[in-house]
Image (cartoon, rainbow, N blue to C red):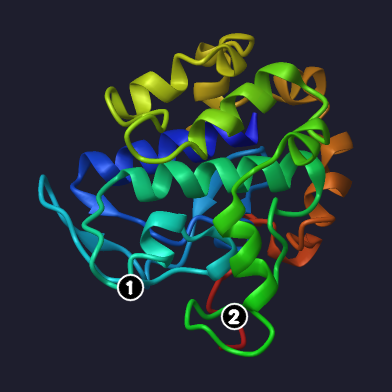
Amino acid sequence: MLAQQVAWILQEVHAEGYLYRDVKLSNFIVGRQGAVTLIDLGKAKRVGKERTLTICGTVHAIPPEVLFGAGTYPYSYEFDYYQFGVLLYEMLVGVPPFGYEGANPKLREGTTHIIADIAKGLNEEQLKLVKDPAAASLIKQLLFPPPTRLGGKGGWKEILNHEYFQRLNSAELKTVYEGQANEQLLDRWDFEGARQEIEDFGLDAGRYEREDSDPFENF
């Protein structure tokens, strides 16, 4: 449920001609009715149909072709497709495939081993930790090199046509995404029961949206 909403959000960002470039759990919040909201646009860049060379992002999720391209690899929306794959892996396994160390993409002490792991790519042992075969297939294809990376030919439509997303009722999920879900739907999807899992990723109760709160209170 949450992954498809993230995909829709990034699809909208791309439709406006922007790369997001910092897809990670701490940049998404979940509202009281299950709607996902994107925050922190600090690394977003308008590219339209062009490509860019800038190296930026959080190192555990930077695509290897960009990380090792030393500012010479021209990239576009496939950057975010890769990061979405890393995010999905983290949501399902509990940690990103190559670890967390190194918040800065510059090579420095403490980031050497994670950079080496990124260079090796996702292996079968790591993929076995994803218990859902459809999810494992999706993640594997999102982490492929650019020529064959899922989304490279058909964008988010290609990604959302993957079997992993076909099991969800998109019409119902749209009501959650738009903040219009009724209580019966939320109960059926056991969203309350999923809150502890969400909190495990750092989205604590204090960060849930509250309809009756003032975001600038005590500012």
Contact (Cβ within 8 Å) of mark 2 with mark 1 = no
In front: label 2 or label 1: 1
Q: Is residue 130 visible?
A: yes
Quarter occupied by residue 53: bottom left
Look at the numbered disc 1 and give the secondary structure of its residue.
loop
Q: Is residue 55 left or right of residue 168?
A: left
Q: Label 1 sits on what residue type? A: Ala
Look at the numbered disc 2 and give the secondary structure of its residue.
loop
Q: Quadrant of the N terminus?
A: top right
Q: Is residue 70 left or right of residue 27?
A: left
Residue at x 47%, y 45% (from the top left corner): 82
Distance of mark 2 from mark 1, alpha carbons?
44 Å
Residue underneath mark 2: 217
Which labelled disc corresponds to residue 70?
1
Q: Quadrant of the C terminus?
A: bottom right
Q: Label 2 sits on what residue type? A: Glu
